[in-house]
Image (spheres, grey):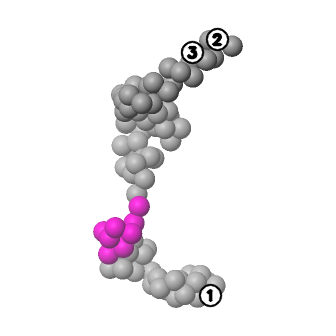
Amino acid sequence: MDAAATEMARYYGLPAESSPCGNYLCEPSTVGSVRSEDWYISDFGSHESYESWITGGKKDILQEARDKVNCILGSHEPLPLGSDVEKELDKICKRAREN
């Protein structure tokens, strides 16, 4: 690790030298952060190995987003409007047809 990277690691509280596993991912502070509620892991994108991604059809993030949108639109049922709102909309539609 060069001097600038070492200094940045120290500034952010990361280990300056490689850990026994070769990176910061097995450091106790990283493990604790990942297990806390402060860590966000997106539902989108592959979180599997490359081989699993290939076997699973190599779906990219845009296709995942399209599939999610289609699923939401296909299953969404809007909440019913109140009767007062329905009456007001009927009045508006009636005025629009008359003009």
Q: Is residue 6 above or below residue 67?
A: below
Q: Is residue 93 above or below residue 12?
A: above
Q: Is residue 17 left or right of residue 31?
A: right
In the picture of the structure, the residue carrying the numbered disc 2 is 98
Q: Which residue is more in the foreground, 15 or 41?
A: 41
Of the image marks 1 and 2, the number of the one nearer the N terminus: 1
Q: Is residue 82 highlighted in magenta?
A: no
Q: Mark 1 is on which residue type?
A: Ala
In the picture of the structure, the residue carrying the numbered disc 1 is 3
Q: In the image, which is nearer the foreground, mark 1 or mark 2?
A: 2
Q: Is residue 88 left or right of residue 5?
A: left
**Pointers 1 and 3 in contact (C-beta within 8 Å):** no
In the picture of the structure, the residue carrying the numbered disc 3 is 94
Secondary element at image label 2: helix
Residue 7 in the image: state x and y as whole percent.
Answer: 58, 88
For marks 2 and 3, give the CA distance.
6 Å
Q: In the image, which is nearer the foreground, mark 1 or mark 3?
A: 3
Q: What segment is highlighted magenta in the picture?
A: 32-40
Secondary element at image label 1: helix
